[in-house]
Image (cartoon, rainbow, N blue to C red):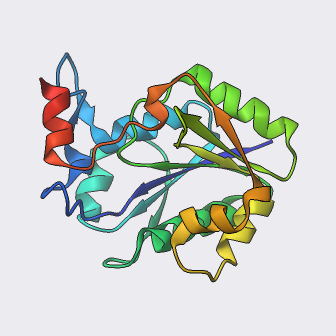
Amino acid sequence: MKRIGVLLAAGQSKRMGRPKQLLPWPPKGENPKPLVAAAFDAIARVCDEMVVVVGHQAEDVVAALGERTFQRTAGDLGSELFASIRRGLLGASQVDPTADVLLQPADHPQVRLDTLQTLLARLAENAGLAVMPTYRGKGGHPVCMPMSIVNEVLGYSGRGGLRQFWIDHPELCVRLPVDDPGVVFDIDTQSDYDFCVQ
């Protein structure tokens, strides 16, 4: 089964106060890369193709991805995150309407390869259901879903975004506990980033 990664990189980083997609990652150590590139690379190793949703400072974000190959799609500036999610999922469905999708925010750079392999194995075992990793009871990323669930999300008209979608349709998602804090690790604020620098 073909796999398409969808990277959500359109946000304005209001809580950060500057474009977090462009921050060096890791902040300590040799050869850091932009955070958006680290999040891309985290899931691209198990994906056949990638779709990147850009919006705020789009050209800078695209430039930060360097020579990486991906389909670019535009998010709605000023809209809720769910609008960017739908843009990315629609882009993936246009690349291949039979593929599985891995949905990943651009500030999640640390999911392990063995975790990805576990998620994809569970996805194959649970035909027609999405698989969401959890760590210590908290839902994380990437969310892996077959195209049938992608289409359900695209057709969802409820309020509250993707989080509310899973609340409304718990029967469509398997929550898989994993021993990987990287699935819930993200960078939302300057304090989050400064903590990593220390």
Q: Quadrant of residue 2?
A: top right
Q: Is residue 135 visible?
A: yes
Residue at 20% of width from left, 16% of height from top? 30
Residue at 21% of width from left, 40% of height from top? 192
Q: Quadrant of the C terminus?
A: top left
Q: Position of residue 34 (x, y in %)?
A: 26, 39
Residue at 41% of width from left, 29% of height from top? 110
- Would you say 52 lies left or right of 17 here? right
Q: Quadrant of the N terminus?
A: top right
In the rendered image, the vertical position of residue 4 relative to residue 171, given as above or below: above
Q: Position of residue 62 (x, y in %)?
A: 32, 54
- Would you say 133 lies left or right of 136 here? right
Q: Position of residue 94 (x, y in %)?
A: 67, 66
Q: Position of residue 11 (x, y in %)?
A: 31, 63
Residue at the extreme bottom of the image, as rendered: 157
Q: Is residue 66 visible?
A: no
Residue at the extreme top of the image, as rendered: 30
